[in-house]
Image (cartoon, grey):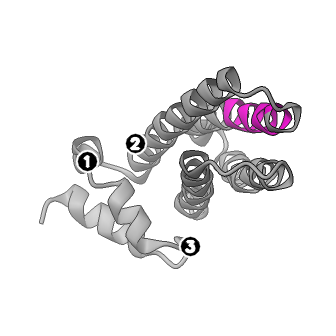
Amino acid sequence: VSASKALIAKVCGDDAILDHDFCLKALSNAQANAAKSVNQLVDVAMKEAVAKAHTTLKVIVEMMKKTSSPATLDALKTCQNVYKNSIRSFGMISNELSEDAMSANYDVSLIGPDAETCIKALAAASVNAPEIANGNHDLQYFSSLGHGMTAKMN
């Protein structure tokens, strides 16, 4: 077992990580396997979160082009804002971590509840969008993962 595989197992097995399987899946890539520290693993996880959020944001933008319903458009705009903010937030975590682990921990924890804003907006407008729903789950999971990974880094 390589040092990084042991590191991944240790991080994903921590009590602060709520979904161990998601953690192992999110960190099952070449970058994670090359990580030498928890900070590097956080960086890998946040980059993965940004990539997934970008994918969902593209879906939202495409749906906005195709809808004529004002209610649907409003819901999608709400989700668009959530995803733009999430991309920015996930992108800041690695830099923040080197300066202030507690700020990084707090900021990453706010992304999950933001996903609820999108979920509620879609529900209120009766928009059925499985790809966005999956994206919202990813936001929540990566937020929880980032929170768990940064929790003990003081």
User: In the image shown, does 129 or 48 lie closer to the viewer?
Assistant: 129
C-alpha separation, residue under disc 3 versus residue under disc 1: 22 Å
User: Is 5 left, or right, of 50 in this rendering?
Assistant: left
The residue at which mark 3 appears reads as: 16
**Which residue is situated farthest in the top direction here?**
65
C-alpha separation, residue under disc 1 versus residue under disc 2: 9 Å
User: Is 97 left, or right, of 69 in this rendering?
Assistant: left
Dot 1 lies on which element?
loop
The residue at which mark 1 appears reads as: 29
Depicted 98 relative to depicted 9: above or below: above
Q: Which kind of residue does numbered mark 3 sit on?
A: Ala
The residue at which mark 2 appears reads as: 44
Which circle's residue, 2 or 3, is located before the other in the chain?
3
User: Is 141 left, or right, of 3 in this rendering?
Assistant: right
Residue positioned 69% across, 55% down in the render: 112
Query: Which portion, as a residue range, is magenta?
Result: 73-85
Other-residue count near label 1 (Cα within 10 Å), few / some / many at <14 / 14–19 / ≥20: few
User: In the image shown, does 116 or 43 lie closer to the viewer?
Assistant: 116
Q: Decide: marks 1, 2 in contact (CB < 8 A)?
A: yes
Quadrant where the N terminus sits is: bottom left
C-alpha separation, residue under disc 2 versus residue under disc 3: 18 Å
